[in-house]
Amino acid sequence: MEKHPADLYRQHVMPFIKSKLEEFRILGYNHVTEKELWVYLTKKKWKAMQEPLVHELVRDIMSVKAGEFMNHATVETYKSAAWFDSEEGKQLLNDLI
């Protein structure tokens, strides 16, 4: 996996990641992990980032809304080939055919 420029600052911003995950838990999203949130940030929010500044990373982390993260996670799940191998995915495909 290719390194993202923000990876250099991951440990520095980890308290903010943990704070955001705690917010998600309060809202009932108990299953979101640090890794999932980091992947979302690097692939979606910071996709075109070249030279990250710590304050920009923190701003972006703290501005993530649970709904936008969950929408992204849902789309990624549907795009995953493994999902269609699951019982739910097979049933959905059978219902569509």
Image (cartoon, rainbow, N blue to C red):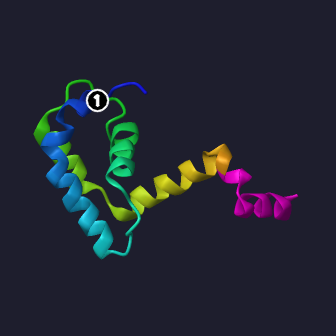
The stretch in magenta equals 83-97
Name the quadrant of the C terminus. bottom right
Q: Does the magenta segment cover residue 2?
A: no
Tell me the chief SS of the magenta region.
helix
Figure disc tally = 1
81, above or below 24, in the image: above
Q: Is residue 48 left or right of residue 17?
A: right
1, above or below 26, in the image: above
User: Percent position (x, y) of residue 50?
Assistant: 26, 24
User: Percent position (x, y) of residue 2?
Assistant: 40, 24
Residue drawn at x 54%, y 57% is: 74
Q: Is residue 51 left or right of residue 86?
A: left
Camera-side residue: 6 or 96? 6
User: Percent position (x, y) of residue 34?
Assistant: 31, 52
Residue drawn at x 24%, y 67% is: 22
Camera-side residue: 68 or 84? 84
Residue beneath label 1, please?
49
Name the quadrant of the N terminus. top left
User: Percent position (x, y) of residue 96?
Assistant: 83, 60
Image quadrant where residue 3 sits: top left
Secondary structure type for disc 1: loop
Q: Amino acid at mark 1?
A: Met
Q: Does the magenta segment cover residue 93?
A: yes
Residue drawn at x 83%, y 65% is: 95
